[in-house]
Image (tube, rainbow, N blue to C red):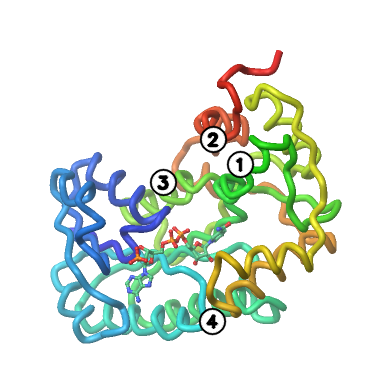
Amino acid sequence: MYFVAGASGRTGSRLVHLLAESGHAVRALVRNPAKSAALAALPGVEVVAGNLNDPAATAALLRGASGAALILPNGPDQLRLETGFYDAAVDAGVQHVVKLSSMEAHADAPNPVHRTHHEAEEHLKASGVEWTIVRTSFYFQNFLNTAPRIRSEGILSLPVGRGRATMTDVADAAAAMAAALLDTRHRGRSYDVTGPELLDFDEVAGRISRVAGREVRYVPEDPVAYKARLSRVIPSAWHVDAVCDIFREIADGYFVEPTDGFHALTGREPTSIDTFLEAHRSQFATDGVRAG
Ligand SMILES: NC(=O)c1ccc[n+]([C@@H]2O[C@H](COP(=O)([O-])OP(=O)(O)OC[C@H]3O[C@@H](n4cnc5c(N)ncnc54)[C@H](OP(=O)(O)O)[C@@H]3O)[C@@H](O)[C@H]2O)c1
């Protein structure tokens, strides 16, 4: 049985689907089972209620799992929750843990999100349990937040200046984690997982134009205005600052190159931005008609 924590989220729910579809028993930890009826309906999936705030209760739920995966949102509690989870996995006798991390994670990263991931990675490696770390880049799915303005004004707007990014599909992050769980050859290794291309945001707007049925222009957003806008939808000031810092770093010229990590884990090519956009065309298009 495989244990998935963060199972109701973007990456975790896809991971549970992939494991169940390949015939494996899954115990999916969620905070609110009422929101996870779709997961509970999958064959071989047991949805359990829990909160990683309670490592003893988590250890009890982890008992019997051969492997476990952890996905947590960014926040000031992330390091405490992650380290508690790894210690609980050791207590419960779990053989192997897969962690979702970020490619930017390193000891002297300026952003607390990335420093947290680095410290959590180090804790996992020292915990005594076997481990695999899947380090992904900026998700394509972040563009879904920009879709309303693309539909209404034909403008892609983010505070990333003239920066560039190599992005990843969240479905690939989940597939990479599934491969890491299921294939013992990946134990004791970290994989940097990206999509196939390094793109600037004019190019992203051009690709969106093709599926949106209209010209879409990239307009760099003023970072101060962006922060004010984000503060209205994200209650945590810590989180708002962290997201704004990530975009500022991109605007300042930070980027990661495409890697072969996804192929090394899965044997497949990573999802392209065109495939992602086509799959989400209804969210970007005004009339469902493709540009010529
Ligand atoms: N976004 C990007 O571009 C990007 C790029 C690279 C790496 N990442 C990494 O991806 C991770 C986020 O992945 P995601 O987008 O799949 O996350 P997500 O959709 O926000 O899901 C997070 C999951 O964690 C659960 N959770 C939160 N606190 C919990 C607690 N105390 N106990 C138990 N479960 C808890 C949530 O449950 P509820 O449903 O109850 O809230 C949810 O299922 C972050 O670590 C981030 O650094 C993101």
Q: Which mark is residue 283?
A: 2
In terms of secondary structure, where does tag 3 sit?
A: helix
Residue located beneath label 3 in the image = 175
Q: Which numbered disc flags the more N-terminal residue, 3 or 1?
A: 1
Is 272 or 212 nearer to us in this picture? 212
Kind of residue at disc 1: Ala
Q: Which numbered disc flags the more N-terminal residue, 2 or 1?
A: 1
Residue located beneath label 4 in the image = 119
Relative vertical location of residue 190 with respect to residue 171 in this rendering, above or below? below
In terms of secondary structure, where does tag 2 sit?
A: helix
Kind of residue at disc 4: Glu
- Judged left or right of residue 209, residue 253 is right
- Judged left or right of residue 29, residue 198 is right
Q: Which numbered disc flags the more N-terminal residue, 3 or 2?
A: 3
Cα–Cα gap, marks 4 and 1 = 34 Å
Q: Residue drawn at (55%, 79%), measured in percent from left and top?
A: 116
Q: Which numbered disc flags the more N-terminal residue, 3 or 4?
A: 4
Cα–Cα gap, marks 3 and 2 = 23 Å
The verdict on label 3 being within 8 Å of ligand 1 is no
Cα–Cα gap, marks 4 and 2 = 37 Å
Residue located beneath label 1 in the image = 147
In terms of secondary structure, where does tag 1 sit?
A: helix
Q: Position of residue 181 (x, y in %)?
A: 33, 56
Q: Which mark is residue 118?
A: none
Q: Residue drawn at (52%, 42%), measured in percent from left and top?
A: 263
Cα–Cα gap, marks 3 and 1 = 25 Å
Q: Position of residue 224 (x, y in %)?
A: 78, 68
Q: Residues within 10 Å of mark 3 (few under 14, many from 20)?
A: many
Q: Residue drawn at (52%, 29%), measured in percent from left and top?
A: 282
